[in-house]
Image (cartoon, grey):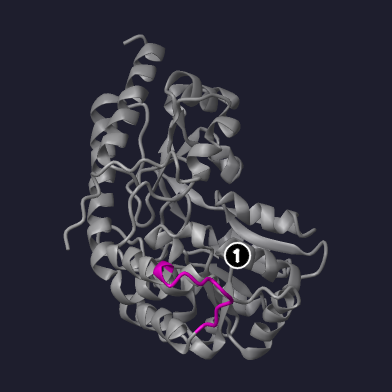
Amino acid sequence: MKYNFDEPVDRSRNFSAKYDECARKFGREGLIPMWIADMDLKTAQPIMDAMEERNKQGIFGYTTRPASYYEAVCRWQKDRNGYNFDKSLAAFALGVIPAICTIVREFTEPGQEVMYFTPVYSEFHDSVVNSGRTPLTVSLKEQDGYYEIDYEAFEEAAKRRPGLLIMCNPHNPVGRSWTREELEKVGDICVRYQIPIISDEIHSDLMLYGHRHTVMAGVSGEIADITITCTSATKTFNLAGLQAATLFFPNHEMKDRYEKFWFGMDVHRNNCFSLVAVETAFREGGEWLEQLLDYLEGNIDYTWDYLKKNIPEIHFLKPESTYLLWLDCRELGLSGDELQTFMVQEAGLALNDGRGFGPEGGGYMRMNIACPRATIERALGQLKAAVDRKMGR
C-alpha cells in the first residue's frame, strides 16, 4: 500500500512525552517539539491491524513468547544486514537503554571505567554514572561536519583496560554509519585489550542515501566473541511506547548472567501488544520502511536546501543513518545557554542542546525531522525569522 506521511497526526491525546513534557523541559508553551527521537508518523498498517486483532480478543493476561518471535528478529537481521544471529543467544529487554544499564551493572565493578565515543546519546553517560561507574570518553574527530574515530586516542584509552566499550552503531547524534573497516579497527583494539563491547544498533534499519549497516559482531569471529548486540523494532517502526528490545549475547554464560538479574525481578515477558507488534513489524513492515526512508531523505534534503538558501549560518552534513540532524549553529555567535535560549524563546523550537551529548556538542543542536513536511516548513520558517532578526536582515 501507499503511505501518506504528509498526513498530520494529532498527538494531543497520545500521552506523548515529546509533547506533554515539552513545556516542563523547555520552560514555555507553544514550542514545536523536535527533540525526543520518536516519529510524528503513523506506524505500518500491518502492525496496527495485528494489534487491533489482539485487542479484539478482550483478554490481556500473561504472555508467553513463541519461537516465531526470535525467528522473525533473526530473519530480519539476515535479510537486511547479512548476519545470522543465533536465536538461542537472544534475550528480551524492556529497551536498549535499560539493557545497557543492566549490562554495565552486571558486567563491571563499582568505580570501574566504561568507555564510549563523544559526542553521543546522553543516556550512555547516565547509564555509566548512575551505576556508580566512571566514564572514559574518547572524542570523535570532526572535519567539516564529518566525524571519524581517533584510533590513536582510542587505543591510549583502551590501555586503561575499561570494563566495557559502549559503541553507538550507527551513531547518534552525528549520523555516521560506521564502515566495516572502521568497526574492525575498533574491534581489534578491544580484542587486544580484552574489552567487551556493547553495540547499540537501534538505528541500524534507518539507513539513508544507499548506506548499508554493518553488524559489529559480523566483522570477525574474534570480535563477535566479545560483543553484545542491542537491537529493537521500536526506533524503526515508532513503537517505543511498547518497550521491547532484543539482545544477542556471544555465549550462554553471559546471557544467563544478564537474564538472572531480570528473572530475579520477574521481568522477562513481552506485554501482549509488543509481542504481536514486533513480530509483525519484522515480518510485514518492509514495504512501510522503504517508503519511510524515502520520505526521511526528502525531509533531510528539504532542510538542507532551506538552510543553505535562507539561513547560511546554520548547516549540517547529511546523515548516513537516523532521522536526527546535527545542526552546526556556531556561526550564530551564541555561547553557553544563549543558543538554547535563542531556539526556545526566539525561534519557538524544542531541540536537543548539543552540550547534552558531551562537551564537543557546544554550538550544536539536534533536530528530529521524522515528522510531516509541513511541520518542518513551519519550524524552519520560525527559525529563519528569528535568525533574520538577530542578524539584522
358, above or below 220, in the image: above
Decide which of 290, 2 is in the foreground and name it: 2
Q: Quadrant of residue 271?
A: bottom right
* x, y percent for residue 136: 69, 57
Residue for point 60% across, 49% down: 122
Q: Extreme front residue here?
A: 58
Report the residue at 30% width, 62% height from top: 44
The quadrant of the picture occupied by the N terminus is bottom left
The residue singled out by tag 1 in the image is 166
For the residue pair 66 and 210, the one nearer the viewer reads as 66
Q: Residue furthest top?
A: 392
Viewed as shown, does residue 281 lie left or right of 109?
A: left
- Of residues 327 and 10, which is closer to you in this image? 10
Is 277 situated left or right of 42 in this image? right
The C terminus, quarter of image: top left
Number of residues whose C-alpha sits closer than 10 Å to that of mark 1, classed few (under 14), some (14–19) or many (20 or more): many
Q: Main secondary structure of the magenta part?
A: loop
Is residue 61 among the parts visible in the rendering? Answer: yes
Magenta region: 55-65
Q: Label 1 sits on what residue type?
A: Ile
Q: Is residue 36 left or right of residue 48?
A: right
Residue drawn where x is 50% and y is 72% of the image: 59
Q: Is residue 159 visible?
A: no
How far from the left and from the top, in percent, is residue 337? 59, 26
| Position of residue 104 measured from the top left corner of the image (x, y, whole percent) | 70, 67
